[in-house]
Amino acid sequence: MKNIFATTLLLGFIAAAILTFKTYQGLKPAPKSFHEVLSDSQNLQILDRSGQPLNVTYQNNWNIHHNLQLHQFPDFLKKAFIISEDKRFYQHLGADWRARISALFTNIKAMRAVRGASTITEQSVRMIHPRPRTIWSRWLEGFEAASLEKHFSKDEILQFYLNQIPYAANRRGVLQASRYYFNRDLDTLSKKEMLALIVLVRAPSRLDLWKDTKKIEGSIARLIEQLIAKNIISKTEKKIILAQSFKLDKPTLDINANDFVSHVKTHPFIEHAGWPNVRTTLNSNLQANIQKMLDSRLKYLAPKKVNNGAVLAVDHQTGEVLAWVVAGKENDTPARFIDAVTSPRQPGSALKPLLYLLALKKGWSAATIIDDAPLIESVGSGLHSYQNYSRQFYGEVTLRQALGNSLNIPALKTLQYVGAAEYLEFLNNAGFKRLDKHVNFYGDGIALGNGEVTLYELVQAYSAIANRGVFKPLTIFLEGMENEPQRYISSPQAASLLANILSDPKARQMEFGEHSVLNFPVQTAVKTGTSNDYRDSWAVGFNYRYTAGVWMGNLDQRPTEGVTGSIGPALLLRSVFSEMTKHEDTRPLPIDRELRKYDLCQDTNQIKQTDENCETYTEWFIKGTEPKIKLRHAKKESIKLRQPVNGLHIAYNPRMPKDVQAFEFFIGGIDEDKKVEWDINGEVVKTNGGKYLWQLEKGQHSLSAVVFDGKTKIATIPRTEFLVK
């Protein structure tokens, strides 16, 4: 018997030693601080300029965005949590061994796991050191809980627990759960809603309120009985609480800056901008207000098939982005993943100010005369006739009028003056990196905005004009931004003169009327644009301090129903500028001191002499471009056969009488008093002026011509082949 006892004692000692060794080996140290625990999370935080968070992610290991101090949790919630999860929380030393033994007997009696006995401290350990749910893990958690309570106070552990306890949908902590289910903060919840959050901890997925609000009722009723026993609530309150129903509400962000945050996260300089707490230039209040305005405007334009929009607002004095708003991406289409601020679209006439800025830089003035007359150009084996939006032609107009009224034909003639290749290079220097094709790819259409650019690039370029011709990239960080060097894209005088034109209500009266929506209360340089088939509409502008741009359209490339820049975005742009300046002392756009002002006679466009009696208008000039004896005109159109073009195919209609089918030959660049000898298939026809109506005949034809000024030959039109089929 003594040997058996000794052997048993020895084996017990060995088993205890092994258990002690294995326990020691399996234990993990308590953290030095709870901050250390959270440090392994992806804790990149994007902040606005005042420090308000812009990004909230639920893919982290921990809740790093919505942490409360213990005193910020409602007292009822804290008391009910302790009753539900750990009645002796403030008495035990980490593990409640008495509760464990009681739970063991209960489970044995029921022959299944009816209840557990993990304390709040042990549950905290389980979050810090996750393990498989085994008896051995429970054994180790008891010792680690005791160690945790040696390093932290009860209140510190409870605060950590309430902030980090896991719920459904990757939410952690009671506050995140409250916003996920009720879209409200804890102090606004009813007692039943608080009790639901407590019970959900036991089975977050099975009892998920978004799946079923009835399944949790029994658990809440049983918890209420425990609270009544502890005199935390009364029996009368029980009836009131149980009678209440849940009103779930989908959570929403106070600030919708998802596209901006995505841009920030992928920026190459983010690690130099205060990582991991990145302070950006965004103004959250302005962002939220513009978001509401854009949403409202899109709702109003929805019948016209406008589903998407974007606004970019910046302080051009500092280059800081203040608002980056994208709307209309709620529908379940691939387009919802596109950031409309950085998505390339056709700008239409919104790009024209850059064309005229280059013309001013090269020597034209705001009073340069350009002929707004019909213009036809060849496109492949066909012809394209250019029109203004109103389909009117105004004859001789000044550069100021051409730009102010966004006339197309003067823009094409301005492109001929500056040169398409030089204009494309100028645009690249102004930050339009998307325009990277050969100049032949765009053709003359580059003058009318057929190349795709982004709202970001457009606002950045307008900011350069607003900054007296100085280009500097926009910035999104308050610190650590490494910008490329500033550079001049034009002289301060040219930029100032262009701003004056774009802010002149009289300059745009012919096409936009006297009381245009573009006449802002505070002097603002504004330009609209509309792309082909009304797919894109734009409004961009700047005042004394701010530059902003608005785009509207459809991210899936569908056309709208006739929405132009002045119909769609312009009204919103007015509201955006009003919002940005509502608390400021406003002022007009400055005029560069080097610009010179003259009074010109309207009928002659020459400087008014002292003794001359004529109606006058005032114009500003860059030194060296002011009129001398005769005001500079745009270069006259060269003498050229406009139609037919070589290789043209003309369709003959067999259903129409032959004698009513005709085609107009047209030579551009000559006046009506010039004589033309047309050679058509060897037969000569003489006319006055550059037009001849020729009766159609099927077959291959050839045409040449000679132009005379009196008896002097001034031009020869080479032979052109065309087909009537």
Image (tube, rainbow, N blue to C red):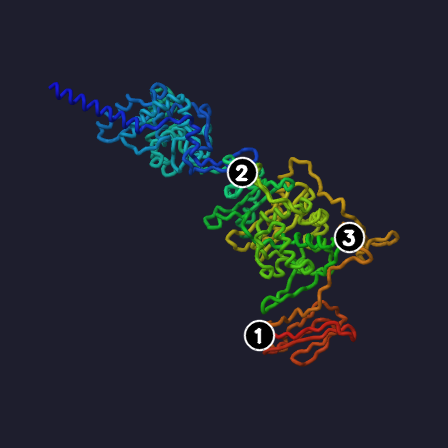
Q: Which residue is mark 2?
A: 272
- Residue 47 is at least partly visible in this image: no
Name the outermost residue toward the bottom.
682
Name the outermost residue toward the right.
611
Instruction: Choose between 624 and 485: the one closer to the eye.
Output: 485
Are dots 1 and 2 in contact, CB under 8 Å?
no
Q: Which residue is mark 3?
A: 624
**SS for dot 1:** loop
Disc 2 residue type (three-letter) = His
Q: Which residue is mark 1?
A: 653
**SS for dot 3:** loop
**SS for dot 2:** helix
State the CA–CA distance, disc 1 to disc 3: 56 Å
Q: Residue at x 53, y 38 (%)?
A: 272
* Mark in the foreground, 1 or 3: 3
- Where is residue 73? Give x, y as percent: 44, 25
* Mark in the foreground, 3 or 2: 2
Disc 1 residue type (three-letter) = Asn
